[in-house]
Image (cartoon, grey):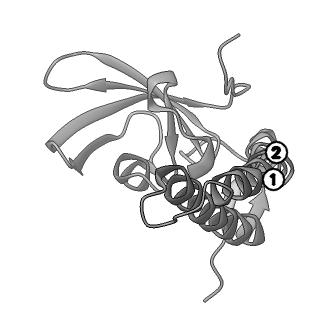
Amino acid sequence: MEKIEPMTLFGYEKLQAEVKNLKMVKRPQTVKDIETALEHGDLKENAEYHAAKEQQRFIDGRLADLAELIGCAKIVDPSDLEHAKISFGSTVVMTDMDTDEELTYTIVGGCESNPDMGLISFGSPLAKQLLGKKEGDEVKVQLPGGKKEFEIDEVKYQEIVFECD
């Protein structure tokens, strides 16, 4: 089964920018750092060399991860989707039934998530259990911290703000 990674254009461009930065800036600098460290001689006790090689392995691994993610990317414009039920790009206003606390989350792609800003990945435990629900539904969810019960107050589309100014 082909893996599909939904994301907004913002998320796709963010991944592309990271790839460009790693290939054009970070990796070339790391190669220079390795060359400089090699000039110091004895590699057994050359901390700079080992740190630079470790950094190179990290960059290469991240590039491989990004290539896979970009290869699976499906750019979705949430404004084109129906939001009568919770789906990708929906903003959900809900009330914690135990505490009466009102919570607002927007469901986004994994590479776009930022829980501190209320952006949760469609693959997160909460989002998976909210998908398909609608206003007025009461939902019991199993989260890593235990069971929670919420009432869905509102499901809507609003323009997604990914970064603070």
For the point 67% across and 70% down, which residue is it? 64
Is residue 164 or residue 144 the one in the foreground?
164
Residue at the far bottom: name it. Answer: 1
- From the top left corner, tell me how far across and down residue 24 is, in percent: 87, 50
Question: Considering the image in quadrants, where does the C terminus appear?
Answer: top right
Marks 1,2: beta carbons within 8 A: yes
- Residue 119 horizontal side relative to residue 98, left or right: right
Q: In the image, residue 73 lies at what x, y percent?
A: 74, 64
The residue under label 1 is: 28
Q: Residue at x 46, y 34 (%)?
A: 135
Please name the residue shown 43% across and 48% down the image: 127
At horizontal 43% and vertical 67% (from top left) the residue drawn is 44
The furthest residue to the front: 41
Looking at the picture, tell me which residue is in the foreground, 23 or 118: 23
- Give the residue type at disc 2: Val
Q: Is residue 126 visible?
A: yes
Residue 58 disc label? none
Element type at marker 2?
A: helix
User: Quick check: 88 above or below 123?
Assistant: above
Dot 2: within a 10 Å radius of its alpha carbon, few (fewer than 14), some, or many (20 or more) residues?
A: few
Q: CA distance from mark 1 to mark 2?
A: 6 Å
- Residue furthest toward the top? 165
- Bin the neighbour count of mark 1 within 10 Å (Cα to Cα): few under 14, some 14-19, many 20 and up: few
Residue 25 circle label: 2
Q: Is residue 109 visible?
A: no
- Helix, strand or loop at label 1? It is helix
How many numbered marks does the figure carry?
2
Please name the amino acid that badge 1 sits on: Pro
Say left or right for 39 vs 124.
right
Q: Quadrant of the N terminus?
A: bottom right
